Image: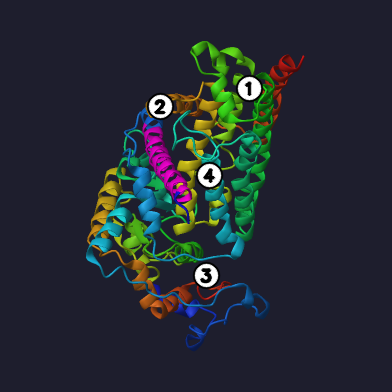
Amino acid sequence: MNRELLVLIGKAIASLFLIANYGLILSGVMYKIIARVHGRFGPPVWQPYINLFKLLSMRTAVSHGIMFYLGPIFRITGGVGLYLLIPAVYGSSWLSNFSFSGDIILVLYFIFFGMLGMALGAAESGHPYSAIGVMRGLAQNTASELPFVLAVLALVAQYKTLSITGIVAAQQGGFANWTVFTNPLATIAAMLAFIGMMHRSPFDVHLAPQEIPVGPPTEFHSSYLFMMSFNRAFFGSAKLVLFANLFFGGATSIPELVAKTFLIMLWTVFVGVVFPRYRLEQSVRWLLKVPTLIGLLALALQMF
Amino acid sequence: MDDRKMKHRSPVPEEELLSPDAFLAPEERGLFCQDRPEPVEPSKVKIVRDFCNWAQANSIFILAFGTGCGAIEMRPLFTARYDISRYGMFPRPTPRMSSLFIIGGYASVKTMKRIVRSYEQMQNPKFVMGLGSCTVNGGMYYDSYNTVKRLDHYIPVDAYVAGCMPRPESLIAGFRRIKKLIMEGKAEGANEYAKNFEWYKRNQRRIIKDWNMPEYNW
């Protein structure tokens, strides 16, 4: 193996290590914030780490078949792949990851990749609640993808590039160049779709984490659940980084990245703790109505 | 009435109590795993074992089975007043993910079947807490014809919280007791169940009349 390849792999591992820890701490902080809004103390900030260790230390695990094994692997591949295709810090040699020209299309695909794998894995478990959760999850994700894709297309038309690095480069040079100011309609459409993409209330009916139908992960346990929980650290923060890149000027340093992604996450958390849950048809209808129309308007303004 | 007097109600003769497949229709036998559970010992390395126990004790996913009236005392635990999430305890809806099984009150014979099925679907290590006096000795249902008197005849129980009903504070005391047992490595109910499988199965089959489930249903 040549030296350049080894350096590249080393950089990717360092980048993944950083984002995994950031994602875990971020979800710990998020649980704390939600608890404080509820008037509770909440779990400690490092609780996501303990949960992961605990899931790894389970002594037994049962399988329902090959796809059941592959479901969580697809999921974590989707999360890691998505993160590695997005430049986390603009201009950094190791946090630019593997972003290349034309990557926005691949990123849009990768957001869906893990969910499809998960759907196959959950279906193999044979549990009816898994099937219901998968059906609801895919329906809602499709509905939230549409306004997001429209917003991204508006951006592509605006900046005339498919590269995320190109979009970030076009936003450098001050606040006024950020997409949120140059293209507010696309930003609004994407930020509304983002709540659905992050599966936060009011769009969390398919997960319903503390009720009888827990959704797709009903049958997953032990190390399977470890992989799925660990994936949240990658997948959640990758989406945050993507939104910071597309709409808020990206980041030129790690502190800037942390500040921007944290504020974007707060938006979903605050909406989540304030609003009660939508039923599936309500959420799909809302997503296809409000953000999609705003996204269409944003795209139309760019095209004509 | 003692649980043992219930054996006469069983439609199955004593000698058939432990024969596998005795209760499943032939066409259904291939659908289920008939293997019996195997005890899985913790790591021999002390530091690994202690670390696993620490992680198990500080992240407990609860499967709360509201079998009886005592279950109503579990709800306040998740509210701002008691908030057990600060101890790293979270409710989970499925037995697969959970590690602490709370039996919320009296267990009738009919419920016992569901308790056994849920318990067997949980993964090793798993812990059980009996809530209320009815799980200890039947409580106010001591002379009921269809209520189980001693829960630990049927599944291994790590801690009991006595009371009718126990206040949420008592439940928190019970959780602390369970955490202490886990940290000390003394909460090995899953292995105990696997080692004394015949004894538990015999007890379960004595009271569960319509046993239309496999020998061990994980």
- For the magenta stretch, what is the residue range? A4-32
Quadrant in the picture for residue B159:
bottom left
**Residue B11 appears in the figure:** yes
Q: Position of residue A107 (x, y in %)?
A: 61, 38
Query: In front: A107, or A284?
Result: A107
As drawn, A195 above or below A64: above
Disc 3 marks a residue whose amino acid type is Asn
Disc 2 marks a residue whose amino acid type is Ser
Disc 1 marks a residue whose amino acid type is Ala
Mark 3 to mark 2 CA distance (whole Å): 53 Å
Q: Position of residue B198 (x, y in %)?
A: 41, 80
Residue bearing the label numbered 1:
A189
* Left or right of A298 on screen, residue A242: left
Q: Nearer the viewer, mark 4 or mark 3?
A: 4
Q: Nearer the viewer, mark 4 or mark 1?
A: 4
Mark 4 element type: helix
Query: In front: A249, or A262?
Result: A249
**Is disc 4 surrounded by few (<14), some (14 to 19) or many (20+) residues within 10 Å?**
many
The magenta stretch spans residue B195: no
